[in-house]
Image (cartoon, rainbow, N blue to C red):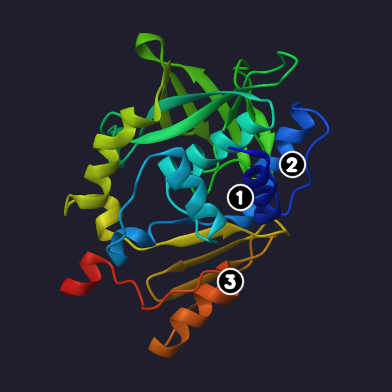
Amino acid sequence: MDPEHTDAYLRRIGAARPAAADAAALRELHRRHLVSVPFENLSIHLGEDIVLTEDALVGKILKGRGGFCYELNGAFAALLRSLGFGVELLAARGFGDGGRLGPPYDHMALRVTGADGSGPWLADVGFGRHSTFPLDYASRAEQQDPGGCFRVAEAADGDLDVLHDGTAAYRLEQRPRELGDFAATCWYQRSFPGSYFRRSLVCSRLTEEGGRTTLSGRTLVLTDGEGRREERELGEDEVLPAYREHFGITLGREPVAVRAAQV
């Protein structure tokens, strides 16, 4: 990323250029990203291609869109590198029903170090409801965060499990990967009819107050920082305005999930 794109990205997330690539800067950038850039899989249901290159991922963010894990963490990695952080892409597998692990490269997370060698931290702006701030990668103690209680635990074969409120969220490999390594599973997630992302439709972001705004199909869920929840079904003429109002996303037509289209 050149300085012009870095500045545009920082404006997109409402963050000032940090004076140093350190822990404090990473915490602020991480939170601002979660507040400003939604976790969404709309491209899958709009027939848009998902290209795992730095230019494509950053370009999508700068156009006001979000994405799912490969896109969000891939773009965030580019931003952090442009600001002087050291960043490695890590592959992970999400835990599903019954503790069953997803396929290899099911998820992407980031191992980040400061310009002064501080860290490492586990940064993840692409898992939906997760930690507000980066986690201490090396710590095996419980870590309190506005998003809950997190712990990084040793797992089999040198991997790590990331637990959220006592439940395993995903299993993390420690070997660094390249962006292209995730292409096959990204294709599966957006193309295979049985994929969760093909069968679901979601757009969600953290709010400034620590709540969450989620539009799933036509169901709008607003949660405040105290956990109070408001849910309602939108009418057909309310969906596109809701994307604009709550997420800053302007669409030409309503995305419809594969499963919803079959009902």
Query: Is disc 3 surrounded by few (<14), some (14 to 19) or many (20+) residues within 10 Å?
Result: some
Q: Are marks 1 and 3 in contact (CB under 8 Å)?
A: no
Query: Is disc 2 surrounded by few (<14), some (14 to 19) or many (20+) residues within 10 Å?
Result: some
Report the front residue among 180 and 102.
Answer: 180
Report the front residue among 64 and 230.
Answer: 64
Horizontal side, residue 80 vs residue 259: left or right: right
Note whether 195 is above or below 229 in the view shown.
Answer: above
Q: Earlier in the sequence, mark 1 or mark 3?
A: 1
What residue is at 38 percent from the left and 87 percent from the top?
236
Horizontal side, residue 259 vs residue 138: left or right: left
- At label 1, the amino acid type is Leu
Q: Which residue is mark 1?
A: 34
Q: Quadrant of the C terminus?
A: bottom left
Q: Which mark is residue 28?
A: 2
Estimate the spatial distance between the alpha carbons at disc 3 and disc 2, rounded to whole Å: 21 Å
Q: Which mark is residue 246?
A: 3
Note whether 148 is above or below 221 in the view shown.
Answer: above
Q: Earlier in the sequence, mark 1 or mark 2?
A: 2
Q: Earlier in the sequence, mark 3 or mark 2?
A: 2
Estimate the spatial distance between the alpha carbons at disc 1 and disc 3, rounded to whole Å: 14 Å
Q: Quadrant of the N terminus?
A: top right
Element carrying mark 1: helix
What residue is at 24 percent from the left and 35 percent from the top?
184
Estimate the spatial distance between the alpha carbons at disc 1 and disc 2, rounded to whole Å: 10 Å
Residue 77 in sight: yes
- At label 2, the amino acid type is Glu
Query: x%, y% of residue 195?
Result: 23, 49
Element carrying mark 3: helix
